[in-house]
Amino acid sequence: MWFIYFLSWLGLLLQICFISLSVAAGLYYLAELVEEYTVFTAKIIKYMIFATTTVYLCLLLFEEFPFMMILFGLVSCLTHFLLLKSFPYFVLSSPTFIASIVFIFINHYYAFSYFATVYYTFGEVLGYFTICLWFVPFAFFVSLSANEYVLPTVLENRPLNTRDDKDMDVVSNYFNRRGKRYGLLSFFKYAQESILPQRVKKQF
């Protein structure tokens, strides 16, 4: 009896490992696609925001969700639209980015408070969280890696009235900034280089 119990826990551990590897491989593939097709990714995220906005309006019309919960969800969609204007370039200290993060926490607070008092099935709760709260932020999270590989633009250029030559040279700013990478794709590449064994070329 104890042996089959041990096998069940071992099988569960192996399943978790396989699922984690599959999710990591999928995220790595998505991050590479976003890096290569940034314009197409921006269009997809825009349609995702439209779809999420439509879902919130349908919840307002056909369900008895709290008005403040729907209102903060719609404002969150508005911040996502504003964040999409500079895509794929993200300024992590910008008011739009900070507001989008704040509204994510506010929407989760309202969702947990509402579903804790009103009974819904697990599938309904998971559907709301997936489509309304996680769908678009997850797309932006995967797209953070594209910020490291975009060409220098006017958005990255600081005011030209400064005397620092590095501030006046957009290309220099771009290559200086490339040394610091914090995106999802950089994390996976760092993990690949540090964990997986490297292939050694044979020298003849």
Image: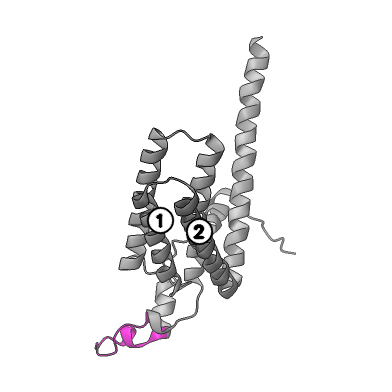
Give the mark nearer the N terminus: 1 vs 2: 2
- In this view, the residue farthest toward the front is 61
Mark 2 is surrounded, within 10 Å at the Cα level, by few (under 14), some (14 to 19) or many (20 or more) other residues, namely: many
Q: Is residue 179 visible?
A: no
- In this view, the residue farthest toward the right is 204
Report the amino acid beneath label 2.
Thr
Which residue is pictured at 54% across the width and 55% down the height? Answer: 188
Q: In the image, residue 171 lies at what x, y percent? A: 43, 84
Q: In the image, residue 98 lies at what x, y percent? A: 33, 61
Q: Which mark is residue 73?
A: 1
Q: Is residue 29 above or below residue 1?
A: below
Horizontal relation, residue 97 to residue 5: left or right: left
Report the amino acid beneath label 1.
Gly
Q: In the image, residue 20 lies at what x, y percent? A: 59, 42
Query: If the image is split into quadrants, where does the N terminus sit?
Result: top right
* Residue 77, image quadrant: bottom left
**In-front residue for pair 110/139:** 110
Q: Is residue 51 visible?
A: yes
Residue range of the region highlighted in magenta in the rendering: 156-170
Q: In the image, residue 71 lies at what x, y percent? A: 37, 56
Residues tagged 1 and 2 counted as in contact (Cβ below 8 A): yes
Which residue is pictured at 66% across the width and 57% down the height? Answer: 200
Judged by its main secondary structure, the magenta piece is: loop
Q: Which mark is residue 52?
A: 2
* Residue 173, image quadrant: bottom left
Q: Alpha-carbon distance for marks 1 and 2?
A: 9 Å
Horizontal relation, residue 164 to residue 170: left or right: left
Q: Is residue 127 above or below residue 147?
A: above
